[in-house]
Amino acid sequence: MTSAKPTRDRKQATEMTREQQLARAFVSLADTLAPGFDPLSLFDGLVRHCVGLLDADAGGVMMGDARGGLRIMAASGEDAVLLELLQLQTGSGPCLDCYHSGLPLSVPDLAADRHRWPELATAALEVGYRSTQTVPLRLHEQVIGALTLFRRAEGRLDAEQTEVAQALADSAALSLLHWSADPDPGAEVLTKTQAAIAYKNALEMAKGMIAQHAGVSVEEASALLRGYTIDRGVSLADTVHALVAGSLDLGRITALPRRP
């Protein structure tokens, strides 16, 4: 008779590995004091960890601006970007509803709920997503954005995974508060969120400038920009601001060999 012990051992090893992955995820989201910290890495990391650790296939993060609107801060891929943009264009979707209510929102069957957000549901179903789970980015009682996870399977994300998604989102929001974009470490949350949004806008502008100068795609421009910062050991944020201000020659970026 075969013992069940090896199976239990394998299960325990898998659980330990998942616990270690979760621990690393929380540590990486909390590391705002690293030299050259990039605030957008918070949101990229949040999406990456959620898609990697949870039963989700794609995701995106939006954050509120000073006028009460939402801005896309990160997305796992082109499909997620388009679905996030569609919510902003139509003014409806789970991300907007979650942001305004401050409550998690589960949509286990987008086809059945098509009437709530017809444009988004149709677009999501066309690219293979059948359900969503959205959680707010919050600092205590203050909601600063929302994280939406898109799933190819129907059904709800289970309670434990929803709690993990919320904890990761809360961790990213808290880290944003600790990040200092200016000499005043006590700046209010709105100041920090606006600084992150401004940086996101500057980054997109810098990538566009590089793409136009070198005649490459925005994705290739992004690779050139990050390659420059890695090769020179300089801050991405400082490089972006120098490009936008015109104090850094675009030729120094585009002259680098393109990374594979």
Image (tube, rainbow, N blue to C red):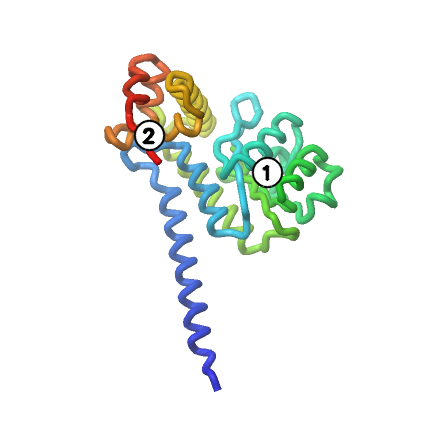
Indicate whether 88 appears above or below 42. Answer: above
Indicate whether 254 appears above or below 169. Answer: above
Residue located 37% across and 35% down the image: 178
Residue carrying label 1: 102
Q: Nearer the viewer, mark 1 or mark 2?
A: 2
Residue neighbourhood size for the residue with mark 2, other residues' Cα within 10 Å, grouped as few (<14), some (14–19), many (≥20): few
Locate residue 212: give its quadrant: top left
Residue located 66% across and 39% down the image: 126
Locate residue 36: give its quadrant: top left
Sequence order check: which comes first, mark 1 or mark 2?
A: 1
Left or right: where does residue 198 sit relative to residue 119? left
Checking the image for residue 258, the label placed there is 2
Note whether residue 188 is visible.
Answer: no
Of residues 241 and 103, the one nearer the viewer is 241
**For the residues marked 1 and 2, what is the alpha-carbon distance in whole angstroms?**
43 Å
Of residues 34 and 186, the one nearer the viewer is 34
Residue that extends furthest to the bottom in the rendered view of this protein: 1
